[in-house]
Amino acid sequence: MKATHAPLPALGSLLILALAAAPAVTQEMVFDSELHDYRVVTVFEGLQDPWSMAFLPGGDMLITERIGNLRIAHDGVLHPDPIDGVPEVRYMGQGGLLDVALHPDFASNQLVYLSFSKPNADGTEGTTAVVRGRLDGHSLVDVEEVFEADAWSSSGSHFGSRLAFDPDGYLFITVGDRGVNPLSIPVEENPAQDPSNHIGSTIRLHADGSVPDDNPFVGQAGYLPEIWSYGHRNPQGMAIHPATGEVWQTEHGPQGGDELNLVLPGRNYGWPVIGYGVQYGGNQVHEGTHREGMEQPVTYWTPSIATSGLMIYTGDRFPEWNGHIFAGGLAGQQLHRIALVDGENGWEVQRMERRPLLFGVGRIRDVRQGPDGLIYVALDDRQGGGTTPILRIEPLE
């Protein structure tokens, strides 16, 4: 892949005017962009540390709160009580109840998938795990674990935890590097470079948690068969292209070097051997930016935007955005639109919005397309204890 450096875009005057009203999120905000003008409205408020959203076939929305709650909203009204049946989570640091995804046949089987930081018996360690359960009224029933990562640590950092189904019904899961200090050991010995564990990897499974026979490392000594790719730091954005089945991810770099990657089977994405950032405080992490046998990002951000949710737009409400990638960012509170082109050396950035579509409205944790073709954004409360809203991006018509 050709790596394209994406510097922080400049703000336009209309956006600056909107930022003046940003603390009062309930106010309508109007923006212009290169292809569509749009407004941002509040759908509902009152969420505590939301992490992910998923839409049910009838338009209801499921939302995870990292504290351990699965919530549901109907017609823009958030149900006051959490859904029953959610597993115990290790709510510490970046851990808790994380992603939510629906089985491709949810309309007939009602299966909901949840990723979370799973505690060990005495709560001193955690790992990334995934369960599924059947949504029955206001409860999850018949809950069963489909994946537990070999990534146990006392750290509360870098769980990964994004979930996505591809058009063939395979379940993809991200697992972070669990916050291992890259300066504490030689880069070659970092566990994200060791595929005998799940640390820093993308996982591919059947919907029931079994391993597909055509996974790239099945039967290879020293490789766990669930692994699709490895050498990742902390992928917290993932989207499957609905037409091609391609797996796209955004991944946290350290201080600089956040990445957008096309994730291919059996590939090594280089963390921490190669990259475009430095460790917090400025110390050099990587041996360089390139190495044979390690993948380049399609684009990267320096300074970091602290990547979060990822979406590929396929709706008709913003026709000029169709097929574009939307990447959320926690740092700088920003949402980027990226248009790609299939060039001679693979996917390349054709155009990135000259400024973020959103900037300064709050820490963007997730971005999803609704069944109405509109774009929904979940805001995150870093400090905890407060509440944040779900926003919606609508065209000016």
Image (cartoon, grey):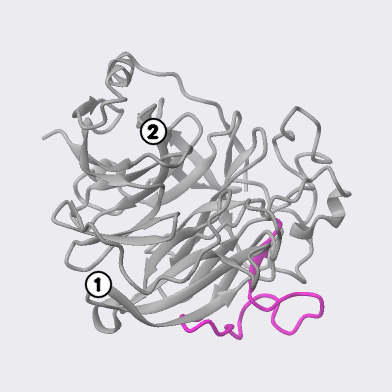
Label 2, on which residue?
A: 362
The type of residue carrying mark 1 is His
Question: Which sits in the foreground, 285 or 122?
Answer: 122
Q: Residue furthest front?
A: 122
The answer to whether one can see residue 295 in this image is yes
Q: Position of residue 270 (x, y in %)?
A: 73, 51
Question: Which sits in the foreground, 208 or 395?
Answer: 208
Q: Quadrant of the C terminus?
A: top left
Q: Quadrant of residue 275?
A: top right
Which label sits in the foreground, 2 or 1? 1
On residue 318, the disc is none
Which badge, 2 or 1, comes first in the chain's sequence? 1
Q: Position of residue 342 (x, y in %)?
A: 50, 49
Q: Position of residue 206 (x, y in %)?
A: 50, 81
Give the extent of the magenta segment. 206-231
Q: Position of residue 12 (x, y in %)?
A: 35, 17
Label 2 and label 1: CA atoms lie apart by: 30 Å
Q: Quadrant of residue 154?
A: bottom right
- As drawn, 191 above or below 383: below
Q: Is residue 53 left or right of residue 157?
A: left
Give the residue displayed 44% in from the left and 49% down from the top: 309
Give the residue displayed 33% in from the left and 16% down from the top: 16
Label 2: how many residues lie within 10 Å, few (<14), some (14-19) or many (20+)? many
Q: Is residue 258 left or right of residue 356?
A: right
Q: Is residue 333 left or right of residue 319?
A: right
Give the residue displayed 75% in from the left and 40% down from the top: 289
- Residue contact at pointers 2 and 1, CB within 8 angstroms: no
Q: Residue furthest right?
A: 186
Give the residue displayed 60% in from the left and 74% down from the top: 148
The type of residue carrying mark 2 is Gly
Label 1, on which residue?
A: 138
Label 1: how many residues lie within 10 Å, few (<14), some (14-19) or many (20+)? some
